[in-house]
Image (cartoon, rainbow, N blue to C red):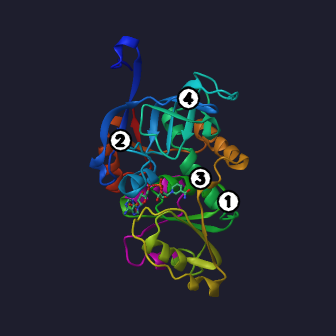
């Protein structure tokens, strides 16, 4: 949108875009829906008209307690849309092309500018909303399972918070890799909704005996790998679920309950605990190629994105509140 600037004598115009911003971190009602100056494309960057914003687990955490780049701050790791302009030196992206993009912040806006290296083309005719949800969730799940988790066919894997974005991606990727998939969620109803994605054993981790249930489902042996995006008390239980030589990946803090962790429990079982951060890998060639392949697979329908609900960007507060109610299964998407 173009509005007249105050310097009318010079006939200058200021282009503004709508964004969901906040001036302080806190509960979802910190969001304000405001005009912000439009981002300007820079060398190596692409300017994107945003069509779908995938609300990532990290977005709700950052809104609650994260760092702010300024006041107001625009939160958000990921969105998709159509390239409006390309910066100097960009040769592999074109105006009019649809892409999905990642960023450290800024996705909750009608327009973003990002380095082209962290964009991935969306194939012609593909579902932009589904593709908007791929890079962080599926890329993280893939790295947890394979690059750092070293999952092999025939092994067992426990996916904590299986109804979350990372969880649903990990379930699908692990199942098709030939693993036995155990997954947790906070209700039996949520477990029934994720079962069709490849869950062999669903476990309600609101029940006190959930660690025993995991061990029981593996004949007492425990699992070869855990992907834990919850942390805190759940992470303590994840270590208790490991088989001899089992590997546990810690990749998130969705539970928001930091607990002191006694890692001495790992030694007797020759077990390991590895942290994973996709952001540290995302610009390398391996990861970019891996994510590009995952976007193509979602576009082709061989991997599924489950979109629970969409909200207008103006209702970002309601969208974040819905996610934090723990009723969402899969992704919640904002539409500018
Ligand atoms: N390190 C990395 O590179 C990386 C990359 C992506 C994501 N992450 C992190 O991984 C975590 C999950 O991300 P995501 O995108 O999968 O999130 P999401 O889609 O919002 O799902 C989070 C899941 O966590 C569960 N959960 C457990 N305790 C919760 C609580 N107190 N409040 C809300 N949800 C709770 C919920 O399922 P139940 O109700 O069934 O328990 C929910 O489905 C986040 O902490 C995120 O920051 C890290």
Tag in front: 3 or 4: 4
Tag in front: 4 or 1: 4
Under tag 3, what secondary structure? helix
Q: Mark 3 sits on what residue?
A: 279
Q: Mark 1 sits on what residue?
A: 146
**Magenta stretch: residue 199 in it?**
yes
Q: Classify 240 as above or below 291.
A: below
Which contiguous range is marked in magenta?
190-214
Q: Mark 2 sits on what residue?
A: 21
Q: Classify 201 as above or below 20.
A: below
Which residue is most to the right? Answer: 285
Determine crowd level at label 4: few under 14, some 14-19, many 20+ residues with C-alpha closer than 10 A. some
Tell which circle, 4 or 1, labels the residue nearer the N-terminal end: 4
Task: Please give the name of the residue rendered at 63% of the width and 31% of the height, measured from the top-left corner.
Answer: 43
Q: CA distance from mark 1 to mark 3?
A: 16 Å
Task: Please give the name of the residue rendered at 43% of the width and 61% of the height, measured from the top-left corner.
Answer: 254
């Amino acid at each position: 949108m173009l509005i007249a600037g105050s310097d009318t004598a010079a006939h200058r115009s200021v282009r503004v875009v709508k964004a969901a911003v906040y001036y302080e971190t806190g509960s979802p009602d910190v969001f304000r829906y405001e005009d912000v100056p439009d981002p300007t494309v820079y060398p190596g960057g692409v300017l994107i008209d945003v069509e779908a914003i995938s609300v990532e687990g990290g977005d709700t955490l950052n809104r609650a307690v994260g760092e702010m780049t300024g006041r107001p701050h625009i939160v958000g790791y990921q969105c998709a849309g159509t390239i409006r302009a390309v910066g100097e030196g960009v040769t592999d992206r074109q105006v009019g092309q649809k892409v999905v993009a990642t960023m450290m912040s800024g996705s909750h806006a009608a327009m973003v500018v990002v380095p082209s290296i962290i964009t991935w083309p969306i194939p012609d005719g593909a579902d932009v909303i589904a593709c908007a949800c791929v890079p962080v969730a599926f890329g993280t799940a893939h790295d947890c399972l394979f690059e750092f988790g070293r999952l092999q066919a025939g092994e067992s894997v426990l996916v904590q918070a299986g109804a979350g974005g990372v969880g649903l991606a990990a379930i699908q990727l692990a199942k098709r890799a030939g693993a036995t998939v155990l997954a947790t969620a906070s209700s039996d109803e949520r477990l029934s909704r994720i079962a069709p994605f490849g869950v062999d054993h669903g476990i309600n981790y609101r029940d006190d005996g959930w660690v025993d249930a995991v061990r029981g489902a593996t004949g007492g042996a425990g699992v070869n790998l855990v992907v834990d995006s919850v942390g805190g008390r759940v992470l303590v239980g994840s270590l208790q679920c490991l088989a001899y030589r089992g590997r546990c990946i810690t990749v998130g803090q969705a539970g928001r309950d930091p607990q002191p962790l006694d890692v001495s429990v790992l030694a007797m079982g020759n077990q390991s605990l590895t942290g994973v951060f996709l952001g540290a890998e995302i610009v390398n060639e391996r990861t970019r190629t891996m994510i590009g392949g995952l976007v193509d697979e979602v576009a082709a329908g061989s991997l599924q994105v489950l979109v629970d609900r969409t909200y207008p960007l103006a209702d970002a507060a309601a969208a974040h509140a819905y996610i934090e109610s723990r009723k969402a299964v899969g992704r919640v998407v904002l539409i500018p």
